[in-house]
Amino acid sequence: MAVVTEETALRAPRPTGARAEAREQAILDAALELLIEVGYDRLSMDALAERAKAGKATIYRHWSGKAQVVVDAIRRMKCDRSEAFADTGTFRGDLVGAMHQVCTSFTDDDVAMVAGVMSAMRTDPELAELVRTQVLDNRGDFNGIIERAVRRGELPEGSTADLVHEVMPALLINRLIIHGQPVDDEFATHVVDDIVLPLLHR
Amino acid sequence: MAVVTEETALRAPRPTGARAEAREQAILDAALELLIEVGYDRLSMDALAERAKAGKATIYRHWSGKAQVVVDAIRRMKCDRSEAFADTGTFRGDLVGAMHQVCTSFTDDDVAMVAGVMSAMRTDPELAELVRTQVLDNRGDFNGIIERAVRRGELPEGSTADLVHEVMPALLINRLIIHGQPVDDEFATHVVDDIVLPLLHR
Amino acid sequence: MAVVTEETALRAPRPTGARAEAREQAILDAALELLIEVGYDRLSMDALAERAKAGKATIYRHWSGKAQVVVDAIRRMKCDRSEAFADTGTFRGDLVGAMHQVCTSFTDDDVAMVAGVMSAMRTDPELAELVRTQVLDNRGDFNGIIERAVRRGELPEGSTADLVHEVMPALLINRLIIHGQPVDDEFATHVVDDIVLPLLHR
Amino acid sequence: MAVVTEETALRAPRPTGARAEAREQAILDAALELLIEVGYDRLSMDALAERAKAGKATIYRHWSGKAQVVVDAIRRMKCDRSEAFADTGTFRGDLVGAMHQVCTSFTDDDVAMVAGVMSAMRTDPELAELVRTQVLDNRGDFNGIIERAVRRGELPEGSTADLVHEVMPALLINRLIIHGQPVDDEFATHVVDDIVLPLLHR
DNA sequence: GCCTAAACGAGACGGTACGTCGGGTCTTGAT
DNA sequence: ATCAAGACCCGACGTACCGTCTCGTTTAGGC
């Protein structure tokens, strides 16, 4: 079920119609491109207008400012990345596979975009929420893996994925953005063996 | 917003001498004041120069841009952050005390600054290193706590603080910047009880 | 001093239209005011923008630099100062009256302005031409006086005002700018009796 | 003969001695070089100090500003400008020779310098006096020519050079600075035949 | 199939801040 | 003790970007 959050507040009263939507899409596409290319801070409205072959007034007719365009652009980016994780037969196998899947789903563009938008997130809760839900957290649901492990008897009854969902994204972000290091297979197995499994097997 | 212009070197080749240091200190003091008064985004170099009774050229002689001045200013603010953690008699007590100490050491300005320079960190390894070592990681050394716990017999021989130093900063950053939530006592005890202790007691 | 930066083109490619012209006029008006008030050297683009209630970018969109704005401002100043000289009945009377008229037409502002742009005139022929024709030479036509004198028989047939137009402005400029002395009635009669009349009566 | 007017007032209290004079000369030489190479406006004190291998403080110890250094530099260039005018045997010959001598003594640098300091002359009477006496008027004394002409009987007893000294510099300045035209031989003979001689022969 | 009104591109505008440059003053270290 | 070297304050420079505001020009939709 689509959880439609209230989104009109973010946007100016806007035109409707086929043309309007075409312009909107062109602008959002350009915004995403620029966001990835130069980052949030150096994304200028002039450049955005030029890239989208749109007038600046058109942009401001649709959104009330830069943050809002970018928010919308990121929201449109919502290809559902949350694919199901494969069943490998063992809990650790499932975890390693899932971690690998999550890690490889992060592109450099993702990281650049998140880093670029991070400062704006502090003052724009809606942007922050969007980035979290659409870009960061939406990478996979570990609940299925946990449930399978419980069924197999590898984890005690009542085990949840909460801690995984709390710790794992933090570790990824920390490594990708703060330390600027890749999230490769070595990292994935390290996280699984040294952190996730101990936490769940305590 | 215009937070960070791309800069490879963190600081320009800078003058030395007593006068230079006096100016540097005056500028950094003014930077801190302004940072607190108006925030990073609205901190203008003109205002900084005026507040510090310095010429803008002097600022740019010492630093290559706004982000760098602010990083330096904050570094000076917390040069003594890495205080020893008190011995409370128990391992958990030590951890909770240390976590509390670390958490309260993070001001809003710290978070704003880190968020502001985050995008620049991706392309400026020196800046990244500086922020990591001076602002993020330099909050406290948990090795003493671990050693005490080993001596008390609360932890097995050979236990190290490595995992703590890997996981804890990531959790803090994630909460502060990504989720925009405060790192309060509740969070501190949660991290200690649900994550750090299980990890070390596996 | 920094009077003139090298510029091949007098003006930047400029916008057209009613709005543009209104801004242009406001800027040129402000430029003239400031030119008179503080002189060319101390006329800053910031002050000009503020006075004209214009953004600096607007000024630079229309002109490529300070010299060019001032050139244009002076060009627009072309109120025709060349009034006819009264017929007093005698050649000397006409001359003294005309000299008085010319002398009193020079305000301190004129002198300040000419002195201010003099250095720029050397490298900017168009500015030089403008200042000459609009500010210096345009003070009065002595031909009528000469013709009347010829008709009265006070001067031989074929007398022209050429020498007057050559010598008199030079003397005025010399006295006003080089010697910084006023062009008062005493000076006027001195010029007429000791220089102009002898030259024409040779 | 060099008419040394009081000139210390224009300059800061200055050191004396062999080294001081050596520095002074080096600075003035460099000033002249730069004046010729880049002109007055783009002659920067930094460049001057570097060229002269002198500290800027040394320059400001000797002179009170850019205009003064340049004035001094040019003065040194033409300390012997006021040569006696040759006796050609006739009054007109003397005049033409003298005018030629005076005209050719004006270099482009002279004109640039005078134009450059002209605005300052209006508010700095001392500078004005210096420029007038050292650069403009000090080009030659016509009194000897007049005296010779009186002795020859070409001029009446009691003739003075006053009018020549009043009119001629004004014409030169007018032509050089206002009209930006050269003072060549044609101009020299024109001034002599059409203006100076008629004025003296009235 | 026009005709009007909205939406559009293009980009000028007032502002704010940027980072640089040059003039004139002041400090430091070497000679 | 003097000087080169150059850091310093000040203030102007010319540029970039923001968000607003005209301009003419499409483009729909109601007649």
Image: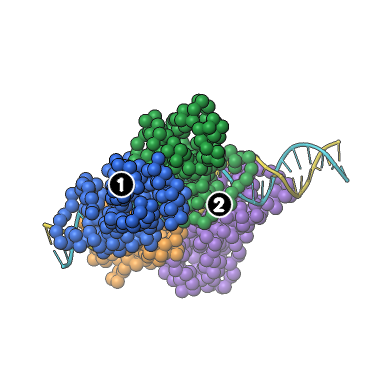
Chain colours: A purple, B orange, C green, D blue, E cyan, F yellow
Tell me the residue at 22%/59% (across/down).
Answer: D24
Q: Which residue is mark 2?
A: C12
Helix, strand or loop at label 1? It is helix
Left or right of F3? Residue B138 is right
Specify whether residue B174 is in view: no
Q: Which residue is mark 1?
A: D150
Determine whether, in the image, residue C52 is placed left or right of residue A4.
Answer: left
Residue C160, given in percent of the width and then of the height, sits at: 53, 40
Return the x and y of residue C43 as percentages of the image width and height: 42, 43
Position of residue A95 measured from the top left corner of the image (x, y, whole percent):
51, 69
Question: Percent x, y for residue A112?
Answer: 51, 62
Judged left or right of residue B58, residue B39 is: right
Please tell me in which quadrant of the rendered image residue C158 appears. Answer: top right
Check the residue under mark 1 and report the chain it is in.
D
> Which one is in front, A40 or A121?
A40
Q: Chain of mark 2?
A: C
Q: Could you tell me how far apart the alpha carbons at marks 2 and 1 are, in whole angstroms?
A: 60 Å
Front in this rendered view, residue B21 or A138: B21
